Amino acid sequence: MIHFLYYALMLLLGLFWYRHGQKVLRKGPRDENGNLNKGLLGPIGFLVATVITGFLGFSLLRALVQREISCLGKGCGNQVYTMAEHTGPYWSNLFYLAWMVLALGYALYVTVRIWMRD
């Protein structure tokens, strides 16, 4: 039951993240004061998010190919979950990595779309 709650909350958070990005995209290029609307990320935040997304994407692909993933928490102590021995924690951590890559990638997409407006 706890896993169902975890996955449902992650999907709900993803839905809210998507709706927020769509709301930002629907705004015009300028606000009511005539200033340009800003994206979700600034230039430095965009570079940092790009590096983090690339690292997490590489970790996700590595975990899929090697079928093992390092624990993604504070109290793990360098524990490695393999798909054969620890199936539940492996897929939980893999789902979390995939969610982070998609969320950061969507933030980058929204920011680029806003920057490329007229």
Image (spheres, rainbow, N blue to C red):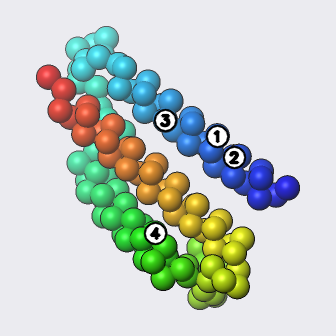
- Residue 102 at x, y percent in the picture: 45, 51
Q: Crowding near pointer 4: few (<14 within 10 Å), some, many (20+)?
A: many
Q: Nearer the viewer, residue 33 or 78?
A: 78
The residues bearing labels 3 and 1 have C-alpha atoms spaced at a distance of: 10 Å
- Callout 3 amino acid: Tyr
Residue 107 visible? The answer is yes
Q: Which residue is mark 4?
A: 60
Q: Kindly identify which residue carries mark 1.
A: 12
What whole-number distance in Å separates the C-alpha atoms at marks 2 and 1? Answer: 5 Å
Position of residue 13 measured from the top left corner of the image (x, y, whole percent): 60, 42
**Disc number lying in front (1 or 4):** 4
Amino acid type at mark 2: Leu
Per the image, the residue denoted by label 3 is 18
Dividing the picture into quadrants, the one containing residue 114 is top left
**What whole-number distance in Å separates the C-alpha atoms at marks 1 and 4?**
22 Å
- Horizontally, is 55 left or right of 82 in the view? left
In the rendered view, tell whether residue 66 sits above or below residue 16. Answer: below
Q: Which residue does the numbered mark 2 point to in the structure image?
A: 9
